[in-house]
Amino acid sequence: MPSTNQVPHLQTALTGPLLELEEQILSHRTEIEAWFRKQFKNTPAPFYGSVDLRNAGYKLAPVDTNLFPAGFNNLHPDLRSLAVHAAQNAVTQVCPIADGVLIIPENHTRNMFYFENLYALQNILENAGYEVHIGSLNPELNAPMVIELPSGNVLILKPLVREGNRVGVENFFPCAVLLNNDLSAGRPEILEGIEQTLLPPMELGWANRYKTEHFAHYSDVTESFAKLINIDQWLINPMSIPCGPINFKDRTGLEDLAQAVNNVLEKTQSYYDTHHIDCKPFVIVKSDSGTYGMAIMSVYSPEDILNLNRKQRNKMASVKEGLQVEQMLVQEGVYTYETINDAVAEPVVYMIGSQVVGGFYRVHTGKTATDNLNSPGMHFEPLSFEESCVLPDENQNPDASPNRFYAYGVIARLALLAAAREIADSKGQLPDINAI
């Protein structure tokens, strides 16, 4: 049994509603697990994903779902067997005769943290029994590149090539191609029309995907789930609305954005008043596509938008690959009242297939409970999730770590189910979530 003595001490400012939520989750875990099995049978989970959660004490909700996750090197070492088993199941479901997996990474050339993630992901798949090579889209790479990692391990990147309707490296063209590149720069022509199984599909890259659509699916998922266990949907669902077109540099659309912010603030304040929540509402304004914590800000009033200075507008104007921001997601802000060694923290849960395989706390010593923590200066504290996310402890109270982490695994899987429904919707195959 994996050791849990390295789990960092968790401090949470708790009030009644979240404890009630956890109690409802724990008392309905049999129905919950049966419901997840049926849902993922109808809409198969993406190959992998990670979900950023925020625990406000009165609300527990996802704020971002990444379908091309990096950070596998930050998972607790005790969880390797969980990840290996989940990877075996996930590859077998999509490619039963696969004997190899090709990973297509981001085009980084010097990001050692990302390379450590690639090595960890490759190691998981190799231990699952697959030959694994990494084929880079980087046009500057024309020969194998050997990278010596800070961990002492060695990673080899090879140029991606295409032969007919298959992509690979050298003489390696497996049926399973795993994207660890979020396609912010668009759909690579070399991947168009290939006969191999691409995981996840290119339609889920940031060239096509919008966070607004994800959270719309998440709202449908949580509406069904809330009825299943008899809870208020608001406890697990952040209000999310789109706003655009926006051009921060020439200030086009800022009045509409300010109005959207005001609408979310007013609705959140109304809910706070009704349920006696003594907090000041805030809003997260972020690009409707893209990742890496870019083009995102915390807002407390409409005037915060109208009074942005040039530096702030330039920061909000572009995302990864220098792409211009055109549409924003205006989302109810969820406080994070968890701390590790007095630094604000938020849990990030990792899944392969529909199985939780681990997670970590994203910790930032320079941020507050309302800030985006995915920013320079963050660090990670790994968690051992094996018992806590899969098997809650009936003999402990709801806010004991095993039960709190089980609740995190449930909410993360709700977000993963929303992503699965995104995939089905992109194929025109979206089933009624209640028709099971």
Image (cartoon, rainbow, N blue to C red):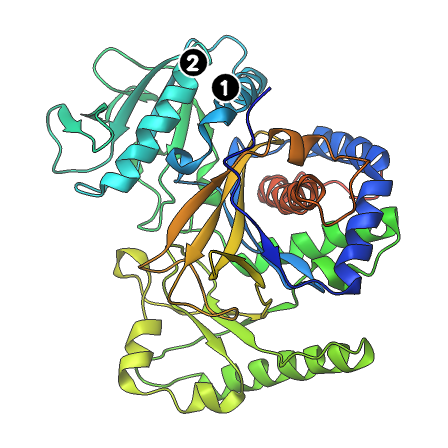
**Image x and y of residue 23, in percent:** 82, 49
Tag 2 residue: 127
Relative to 161, 129 lies left or right: right
Residue 336 to residue 170: above or below: below
Q: Nearer the viewer, residue 264 or 337?
A: 337
Front residue of 275 and 243: 275
Q: Amino acid at mark 1?
A: Val
Drawn side of residue 159 relative to residue 379, left or right: left
Return the disc, 1 or 2, that comes first in the chain's sequence: 1
Q: Is residue 166 above or below residue 293?
A: above
Quadrant showing the N terminus: top right
Tag 1, which secondary structure? helix
Q: Quadrant of the C terminus?
A: top right
Residue at position x 42%, y 76% from top?
Answer: 246
Name which quarter of the figure residue 403 lies in. top right
Q: Residues within 10 Å of mark 1 (few under 14, many from 20)?
A: many
Residue on which the image places disc 1: 84
